[in-house]
Amino acid sequence: MEKGHLGQESAPPYPGPPMAYGGAAPPPGFYPPMNAGPPPVVYQGAAPGPSTTASVTHLVVTPSLQDSPGETVCPHCRQTVVTHVERQAGLMAWAICGCLAFFGCFLCCCIPFCVDSCQDVVHHCPNCHEQIYIHKRL
């Protein structure tokens, strides 16, 4: 390293403006100002005024149905209901039963069929009694 006078190291040269990879740098003023606000509204067809009608689309997000009864809109009767749940032996219960049998615990094989957290949950509509959703384990 070269030393300047008085025992100080000389600084490396300043690299200059950042490099634009893959092409030339955009011209100044290309990007909008930071506090420009929302984009302008463009009306197509009619001029804006009190007679112009805008359509609004509503998206309804229902919470996911899992272990317990939940409020949802039934796709069959189109009513807002709190579901009725029923438990059924599913893949997880059978897999635990098979593992217990494989390791020689034949007396404990029936336990997964009695434990609610090992069974699938079937949600039914209380109005039309149609099946709405199945929460599967595993």
Image (cartoon, rainbow, N blue to C red):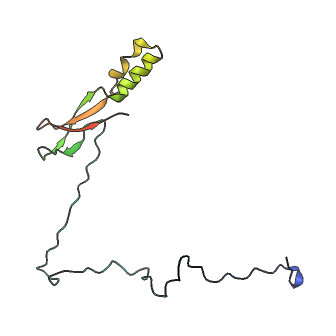
Q: Residue at x 48, y 17 (%)?
A: 103
User: Where's residue 26, x and y in %?
Assistant: 49, 84
Q: Residue at x 37, y 28 (%)?
A: 92
Q: Is residue 5 above or below residue 106?
A: below
Q: Which image quadrant for residue 94?
A: top left
Q: Which image quadrant for residue 116?
A: top left
User: Where's residue 123, x and y in %?
Assistant: 22, 36
Q: Which image quadrant for residue 100?
A: top left
Q: Count every numbered label the image shows and give the total.
A: 0
Residue, far front: 22
Q: Is residue 3 left or right of residue 133?
A: right
Identify which residue, 4 or 13, lies in the foreground.
Answer: 13
Q: Is residue 69 left or right of residue 100?
A: left
Q: Is residue 54 above or below residue 66?
A: below
User: Where's residue 56, x and y in %?
Assistant: 19, 67
Residue, far bottom: 28
Classify the position of the N terminus by image quarter: bottom right
Q: Residue at x 20, y 80 (%)?
A: 43
